[in-house]
Image (cartoon, rainbow, N blue to C red):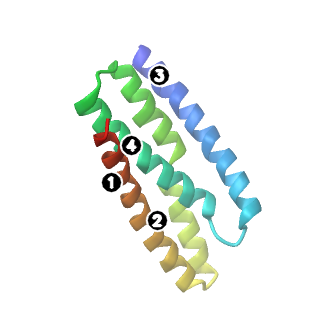
């Protein structure tokens, strides 16, 4: 039962973090989905860091792993919003912007995951 509570709390914190990040980023640049891009990059870094750190370096309870990965990162990151953003750009005829967003999302999120793994290797 505690596993479900850990996931629930992590998901709530992650979703709140996504909302606050999106609000802050919309003040910087309302013309591009910088908030969604940012949370997906941050979440990918945390996932890579946590995965390697908890699998190879330190021992933590399984509930904490679930809290961080399934809960927090699951609540923080969002593929559905990314998909809707791309759809809206295509519908508005902003094909180059949509292509740039897709490329940046994939390259930067994967890069952040690899960076998280590399940072965790230093511990």
Q: Nearer the viewer, residue 111 or 70?
A: 111
The earlier-in-sequence mark between 2 and 3 is 3
Task: Say which of marks 1 and 4 sits in front.
Answer: 1
Q: Nearer the viewer, residue 29 or 57?
A: 57
The earlier-in-sequence mark between 1 and 2 is 2
**Residue 105 versus residue 113 in the image, above or below:** below
Relative placement, left or right, of 66 versus 56 is: right
Task: Say which of marks 1 and 2 sits in front.
Answer: 1
State the image quarter where residue 109 is shown: bottom left
Which residue is the site of mark 2? 105
The earlier-in-sequence mark between 4 and 3 is 3
Q: CA distance from mark 4 to mark 3?
A: 16 Å
Q: CA distance from mark 1 to mark 4?
A: 10 Å
Which residue is the site of mark 4? 47
Q: CA distance from mark 1 to mark 2?
A: 14 Å
Q: Residues within 10 Å of mark 2 (few under 14, many from 20)?
A: some
Q: Residues within 10 Å of mark 3 (few under 14, many from 20)?
A: many
Q: Helix or strand or loop: what does disc 2 sit on?
A: helix
Return the mark for residue 6: 3
Relative placement, left or right, of 16 versus 53 is: right
Q: Residues within 10 Å of mark 1 (few under 14, many from 20)?
A: some
Relative placement, left or right, of 20 versus 6 is: right
The earlier-in-sequence mark between 1 and 3 is 3
Return the mark for residue 114: 1
Residue 115 in picture, x, y percent from top left: 36, 53
The earlier-in-sequence mark between 2 and 4 is 4
Return the mark for residue 95: none
Q: Helix or strand or loop: what does disc 3 sit on?
A: helix
| Residue at image coords 58%, 32% | 12
**Residue 18 versus residue 101 in the image, above or below:** above
Q: Are marks 2 and 4 in contact (CB under 8 Å)?
A: no
């Amino acid at each position: 039962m505690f596993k479900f509570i850990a996931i629930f709390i992590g998901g709530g914190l992650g979703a709140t973090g996504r909302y606050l990040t999106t609000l802050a980023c919309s003040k910087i640049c309302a013309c591009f989905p910088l908030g969604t891009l940012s949370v997906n990059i941050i979440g990918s870094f945390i996932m890579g860091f946590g995965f390697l750190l908890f699998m190879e370096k330190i021992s933590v309870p399984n509930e904490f792993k679930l809290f961080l990965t399934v809960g927090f990162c699951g609540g923080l990151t969002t593929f559905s919003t990314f998909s809707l953003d791309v759809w809206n750009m295509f519908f508005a005829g902003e094909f180059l912007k949509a292509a740039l967003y897709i490329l940046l999302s994939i390259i930067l999120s994967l890069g952040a995951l690899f960076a998280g793994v590399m940072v965790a290797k230093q511990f």
